[in-house]
Image (cartoon, coloured by chain):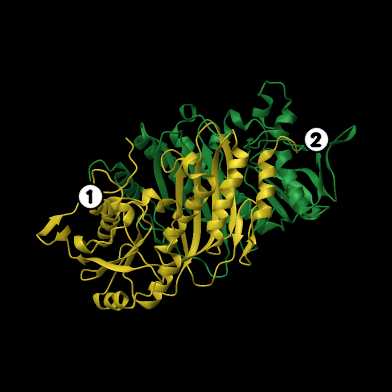
Chain colours: A green, B yellow
Amino acid sequence: MENLPELEYIAWLKGQLTYKDWVTVGPGDDAAVVDWPKDKPCLITTDMLLEGSCFILEKAGPKRIGQKAMNVNLSDIAAMAGFPRAAVVSLALPRKGGKQLAQDLFLGLKQAADLFDTPIVGGDTNSWNGPLAISITLIGTPGPKGPILRSTAKPGDALLVTGQLGGSIRKKHLDFIPRIKEAQLLSQLVNIHSMIDLSDGLALDLHRICNESRCGATLFSDQIPISQDACLMNDDKTPLEHALSDGEDFELLFSLPFLEAQFLLKEQPLNGIKLTQIGEITPEGFFLQNKEGKVPLQPLGYTHKFN
Amino acid sequence: MENLPELEYIAWLKGQLTYKDWVTVGPGDDAAVVDWPKDKPCLITTDMLLEGSCFILEKAGPKRIGQKAMNVNLSDIAAMAGFPRAAVVSLALPRKGGKQLAQDLFLGLKQAADLFDTPIVGGDTNSWNGPLAISITLIGTPGPKGPILRSTAKPGDALLVTGQLGGSIRKKHLDFIPRIKEAQLLSQLVNIHSMIDLSDGLALDLHRICNESRCGATLFSDQIPISQDACLMNDDKTPLEHALSDGEDFELLFSLPFLEAQFLLKEQPLNGIKLTQIGEITPEGFFLQNKEGKVPLQPLGYTHKFN
């Protein structure tokens, strides 16, 4: 089996994997087979990370890129208050140094997945004359109250956020922990109407909730929890602008009835991760409110540009 | 919403999709939600197609590439005798011309998926300064007899194959129809012990069955159905060598008890797709048998090389 490094890599991979009893068939067949709990739907989400566009490989190092690639997907399952059940990983590896890169990436992928008991059950490993691309798909199950959607916010809901926002590019975008456990706890404690993970910036992601829920929102500018990193960005944007539009915070933004929000704000149940009310859901319009009054809020944030 | 072509593309996409009643939440949320049939496990498979390595975009055209990307994944579900239930699609698009490319690709993806009632329920659309990469993940359910694996071939089994082999690069690799329906019918009619779809070449894919099943195999060289395209390749390989080692036939290779194989060979139930016995599963060894005797068979075929 000389000259077949793909097969060698897969053999190495199989030795590294964490097996779970709900995985009947892991890597090595045409598809993996994952037992499914009765009466639970299947959540499925996919996210791709691209060298040069989403990360600089030399700067971050392959292990942290592997972690991030898994964590951005876990964050999507968190946003539904779901439980991840299995992951598959596709890699497009540059030909030169691909084997070492694949192994280093995998250690990061596995570390992130293991933290939330998520077995890697399959994938597709390729090499090409292009940069590194990583595509991950996660399947999962919703919690007892079902999946929490973007499309079910209601006017009058309070808007809450976990943690601090902005300036993630300085550090957090590489070493955040997806809010899986926090989302599960919150959905047990209260009736969350809508939720999203902040991947592309507060204003843009809130706009997505409003679009899907056919409603409006007002953000309270002096309530937005601005991170220290947003203050240290030292460019032509204010810290508030960073908190409103920077991508990759990977915090939870959610809406819920006002009274239940007051309960959460008082109890602060998330073990050191602060919950803050930053606004409210309204029938229509998209505004930022400060002491002087309301100004229209632009849904600015990160999107991929192509033409 | 100027300068946000990703959002525009997603809006266009949502208008194009075929909805199915088992999809509770389609594209537009953090994850899709797919109802799951009781007592069925989840099959999950992923395959990535890369420009320059797996296809030449200018030669094949984006629509056929989209079809192929979906079909290679459907072929993996076929190899388990499964039913596809939903697909997610991640794209890495070159920045220039990316929007038109994304739309043309999507028409091919959808056409292939629709043929097997497979809704596209989500994805991730990115642009970068790299070539086109397409990663698809399919989830599905097994048939009434459960998933058919690579690891359960038994010595004494007859080895059968659908269709003709070799020379796929001339045409078939772009316009094959995945053997979903054929696999389902076969698994109803007989007790298939093991199955794989021929993606990387007969000898290599058979070697995978043997490896996973801890057994051997002998191929009968004068029984292998050599395609016309294998005969027309006109290079330094013989037509038989092409049939043994060319990738992307996407036919089914399967093993089953000898008597049940005789039934299939006589009945030929696949509506114009011929079933041929090409060998047998043995306790050990990997051989090609011709009139003169047995020679060791090399597990040659296509694998990705990186170092």
Q: Can residue B218 be seen in this view?
A: no
Q: Residue furthest right?
A: A292
Please name whichever residue, B75 or B1, is drawn nearer the observer in this view of the structure.
B75
Q: Which amino acid, mark 2?
A: Ser
Q: Mark 1: which amino acid? A: Thr
Residue A26 location, quadrant: bottom left
At mark 2, the secondary structure is helix
Is disc 2 in the same subunit as disc 1? Answer: no
Question: In 3D space, how far apart are the residues under numbered discs 2 and 1 (Cα atoms)?
Answer: 73 Å
Q: Pinpoint the chain carrying mark 1.
A: B
Residue B7 placement, left or right of A138: right
Q: Which residue is drawn at 37% across and 39% down?
A: A103
- Image coords of residue A63 (percent x, y): 44, 36
Residue drawn at 18 percent across, 65 percent down: B283
Residue B122 at x, y percent in the picture: 60, 52
The relative height of residue B303 versus residue B83 in the rendered view (above or below) is above
Does the image show residue B180?
yes
Q: What is the x, y in percent for residue B55?
A: 44, 43
In the image: residue B58, left or right of residue A274: left
Residue farthest to the left, as pictured? B292
Q: Name the residue under label 2.
A: A221
Q: Nearer the viewer, mark 2 or mark 1?
A: 1
Mark 1, residues whose alpha carbon is within 10 Å: few (<14), some, or many (≥20)? some
Q: Residues within 10 Å of mark 2 (few under 14, many from 20)?
A: some
